[in-house]
Image: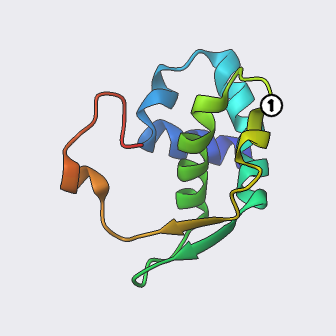
Amino acid sequence: MADEQYQDWLTKSVALYRRMPQDLREDLLKMIPEFIRKVKWVGQEGQHVTEEIKVCIAAEACIPLLRLKGGLDIYRRMELVEVFPEDLAKVSGPGVAGDA
């Protein structure tokens, strides 16, 4: 069930996920829950951190690690993800491949 919900959120919100081959999508879906568990999530300036927000941020963080030796171990010192309410796309304009 979570995978289906994750796929819906990622298809809607993560541009690179939409362009990714199926085998990479499967690897990403395995990494996301581990990343989410690994860090503390803190909303700033009144931002409520939903599961959808966590999944999309985790995906953007994990995509560069796909196929890299060590995987999530690269983030071994990361303890905290702070989420702000401001939409960075509005501040900086649309990116070529997404908003990461």
Look at the picture and state if 57 lies above or below 24: below
In the current view of this chain or complex, which residue is farthest to the front?
Answer: 77
Q: Position of residue 21 (x, y in %)?
A: 59, 15
Q: Is residue 84 left or right of residue 28?
A: left
Residue for point 76% across, 33% down:
71
Q: Can residue 1 be spotted in the picture?
A: no
Which residue has dot 1 on it? 70
Q: Quadrant of residue 91?
A: bottom left
Kind of residue sitting beneath label 1: Gly
Quadrant location of the C terminus? top left
Secondary structure type for disc 1: loop
Number of numbered discs overlaid on the protein picture: 1
Residue 19 appearing in the image: yes
> Image point 46% across, 28% down: which residue?
16
Q: Residue at x 70, y 64 (%)?
A: 79
x and y percentages locating residue 76 in the rendered image: 77, 50
Q: Nearer the viewer, residue 45 or 22?
A: 45
Q: Is residue 69 above or below residue 41?
A: above
16 horizontally vs 64: left or right: left
Q: Is residue 67 above or below residue 1?
A: above
Q: Nearer the viewer, residue 99 or 69?
A: 69
Q: Residues within 10 Å of mark 1 (few under 14, many from 20)?
A: few
In the depicted structure, whether residue 67 falls above or below residue 83: above
